[in-house]
Image (cartoon, rainbow, N blue to C red):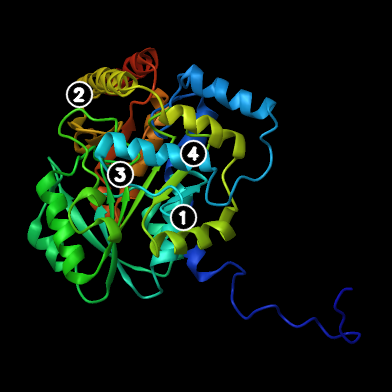
Amino acid sequence: MSRSSPKGTPPAPISDRKTLGSKKAARFTESVIREMTRLCQKQGGINLAQGFPDFPAPEAIKEAAVAAIRADVNQYAITWGARSLREAIAGKYQRDYGMEIDPERDVVVCCGSTEAMIASMLAVVDPGDEVVVFEPFYENYGPDAILSGAVPRYVTLHEPDWRLDADELSAAFNERTRAIIINTPNNPTGKVFAAEELAQIASLCQKWGVIAITDEIYEHILYEGRHIPIASLDGMRDRTVTINSLSKTYSLTGWRVGWAIATPPLSDAIRKVHDFLTVGAAAPLQEAAVVALGLSDGYYRQLAEDYRARRDVLLSALEQSGFVCFKPDGAYYIMTDISGFGFSDDTAFARHLIQTVGVAAVPGSSFYHRPEDGARKLRFTFCKREETLRAAAERLVLLKRS
C-alpha cells in the first residue's frame, strides 16, 4: 500500500539531509585499487595494480572444490565454519607456530579476510574508541575504522626501510585506545615486523589493555626475516585477533574464504557480528580449504622462491625505467618513488601510466590518511607470471622516451 497525501499537497520529505547516503559512507571513496583495475581493463593494459595472480591455483585444491560440489555440499555450513576447516586451521597453527587453537571456540570462518577484519572491528570497537593504524596502510583499514565508529591514530612507518619509531608508537596509546591493527608482512610496503617491534607492541597492548588485530595473509611470502604471530608472544593470546585467508598463499583471491582466530569472549563477539554480516562462507570451498591447509612444507618454500624471482624481475624493470624502489622483505608489492618523472601528483601519473604505456599501478596517496604524504609514490604488484612482468617491463621502458 503506497503512501498518499491530500490533493495538491506534496509528500513529506524523507529527510532534510541533502543526500540519502549515510554520513559514514560519505567519509570514504570507492577502492582506488579496483578503480585502477577498471581503467586498466578499458585500456587493455597490464594490471600491476590489484593483487590477484594471473596463474593457476594448485590443482589439488581446485579438484577438492569440484568434488565437494559434486558431492552436494551446497547448503549452509555451520555459521562460524565447517568443523573440518576449523580443525585444519587449528592443526596448521599448531604445526607452524606451536600455538594451541581450540577449533570449537577460537575459530571464525568468514567471507575472506576483508570480512574477517570488519567483523572483528565491529565486534571489538565501540564508537569513539581509538584504533592505532600504521601508515602507509592497506586501503580497507580507513573505511573499516569509520564504519565501526573508531577514531584512528596513525603511526608512520619511515622509509626507506619502513622503520617503526618506538617513541611515536608509545605516544599513540592512551586510555581511549581500544585496538591496534598490524599487517605483517605488510601491504603496501613489504615490511616484515621484527621480533623487537612486535614485543614493543605487545608491551603497550598489555599496559593499556588494547586488542591487537593482526592481518597475516602474507605469512608465507617472505624473502627476509621470519613471520612471528603476535598472538604467540607471552601475554598476547587472549588479546589478539589473528586474521588470515586462502587468498594470497593459495592464489585463490576470488574464493573469499578467510578466518579470524581469537579466544572467547572475543571470538564469541566476532561470531555474532559475522553471522549477521554474511551468515557464512561458501560451503564447498570450505571443504577445499581443508586440502589447501594440508599442503606440504615444500609448497610454501616453492611459493616464496617463485615470488622472490618475480620480485627481482619487476624491481629490475622499475629501476631501469627510472623509478626509485623500496625493496620488499615480504608480500608481493613494490612501493616506488616517482619524483623523477615530473608529475604533479601520483594519481595523474598513474592515469598517465595506464593511458600511455598500458601498465596499471596504485597511487600512493590511497595508503595515507593525508593524501599529500603519498603523492610521490606508486605501488606495483608482482603476483603475475614472469612473462606478464617481462611484458610490463617492455612497456615501462617507454616512459624514458615519453
Circle count: 4
**In the image, what residue type sits under mark 2?**
Glu
**In the image, what residue type sits under mark 1?**
Thr
In the rendered image, residue 348, in percent from the top left (x then y), is placed at 36, 41
Q: Secondary structure at mark 3?
A: helix
Frontmost of labels 3 and 4 is 4
Quickly name the residue at label 3: 364
Quickly name the residue at label 1: 29
Lower sequence index among marks 1 and 3: 1
Q: Residues within 10 Å of mark 4 (few under 14, many from 20)?
A: many
Residue 28 visible in the displayed image: no
Q: Secondary structure at mark 1?
A: loop
Q: CA distance from mark 1 to mark 4?
A: 35 Å
Lower sequence index among marks 2 and 4: 4
Q: Quadrant of the N terminus?
A: bottom right
Q: Which mark is residue 310?
A: none
Q: Is residue 8 left or right of residue 132?
A: right
Lower sequence index among marks 2 and 1: 1
Q: Residues within 10 Å of mark 3 (few under 14, many from 20)?
A: many
In the rendered image, residue 316, in percent from the top left (x then y), is placed at 21, 19
Q: Is residue 301 left or right of residue 16?
A: left
Lower sequence index among marks 3 and 4: 4
Q: CA distance from mark 2 to mark 1?
A: 31 Å
Frontmost of labels 2 and 4 is 4
Q: Secondary structure at mark 2?
A: helix
Q: Is residue 296 above or below residue 374?
A: above
**In the image, what residue type sits under mark 3?**
Gly
**In the image, what residue type sits under mark 4?**
Leu
Quickly name the residue at label 2: 319
